[in-house]
Image (tube, rainbow, N blue to C red):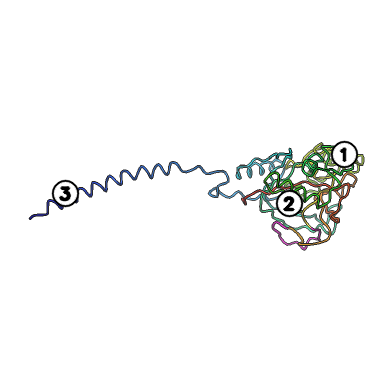
Amino acid sequence: MNRLPYLWVALVLCISACTRTEQSAAPEADQTQSLSPAVSPSSPTDPPQPPVVAPFDSDQAKAHQNAWADHLGVPVQTTNSIGMKLNLIPPGEFMMGSPEREAGHQDDETQHLVKVTKPFYLSVYEVTQQQYERVMGNNSSKSKGTTKSVAMASWNDAVAFCHKLSEQEGDQYRLPTEAEWEYACRAGTTTIYSFGDDTRELPQYAWYNDNSNNSTHPVGELKPNPWGLYDMHGNVWEWCQDWYAAYRSTEVLSDPKRPAQGVRRVLRGGVFFTRPAYLRAADRHNDLPVPFHTYGFRVARTYPLSP
């Protein structure tokens, strides 16, 4: 019996089936590709957003904030449930400390390059008495006022506030490190103050011995720095995370927190009764972590993902 015709028929049927399979598979591949999700502003496939490098002016400071907000897909400013406003601080690098020629320079301000490698939010204002009382249920400030900075806060009080606020909000609130504080205060500047070197301009930005009437004042009444932060100079001293120690050297440091243990904690920013030299961006105050009527704080909120 001749089987050749049957073999030809089988071959034709096989080719026909394979052709139909390829034709039907091609549209499925196209459909899958067309349904691929759009790349988000913070997608790892985007070109990396470069860190900001001081010095830069106030317009550039705002542009850096906007560029990083777009990159991360977050707002430049956010407000939490207790009405606290926080501004995005982009990662970058700056010279921490002060040059020896700066008026008011102290031996513990040796200049060194610091890299802040992660973005974070920082409260626009010092924590107010109203905000503190809503979270902690008490307010021991001597000079009362709902929108005045909370004062008479120990370092432990400030940390406890951050812990309770974190539980309430579901985000990580904390004190800024000393490096983060100075970086945010300078906002790209390399001058004595965040607005320049001229102390005649200080009354526009800070409450201090010449204009405070020897008292704290409501937050946000004066001009902000280039990153939109108020009262970074004067009003109340602000607690930082760090134990106090002299800067080790001029080495480059990334996200420094120093030292691992100590006796006294760092405070920054100056206070309403001090002279201009103590309001400098580089000035460092320190004390035991105890309450005092001029000690307050502002909070940082950790951004959840690395850029």
Q: Residue at x 37, y 43 (%)?
A: 28
- Circles 3 and 2, Cβ within 8 Å, touching? The answer is no
The secondary element bearing badge 1 is classed as loop
Disc nearer the start of the sequence (3/2): 3
Chain part drawn in magenta:
243-256
Q: Is the residue marked by circle 3 packed among few (<14), some (14-19), or many (20+) residues within 10 Å? A: few
Q: Residue furthest front?
A: 137
Residue at position x 66%, y 53% in the image:
117
Q: Quadrant of residue 179?
A: bottom right
The residue closer to the viewer here, 126 or 227, is 126
Task: Tell me the distance, in whole angstroms, between the alpha carbons under discs 3 and 2.
Answer: 79 Å
Quarter of the image where the N terminus is located: bottom left
Query: Distance of mark 3 from mark 1, alpha carbons?
Result: 98 Å
Residue 75 location (% of width, % of height): 65, 40
Q: Residue at x 58, y 50 (%)?
A: 48
Q: Nearer the viewer, mark 3 or mark 2?
A: 3
Residue on which disc 3 sits: 9
User: For the residues carrying marks 1 and 2, which lies nearer the camera in this image?
Assistant: 1
Which quadrant holds residue 20? Answer: top left
What amino acid type should be assigned to the residue bearing mark 3? Val
Give the alpha-carbon distance from disc 1 to disc 2, as whole Å: 29 Å
Residue that badge 2 annotates? 180
**Are discs 3 and 1 less than 8 Å apart at CB?**
no
**In terms of secondary structure, where does tag 3 sit?**
helix
Q: Earlier in the sequence, mark 1 or mark 2?
A: 1
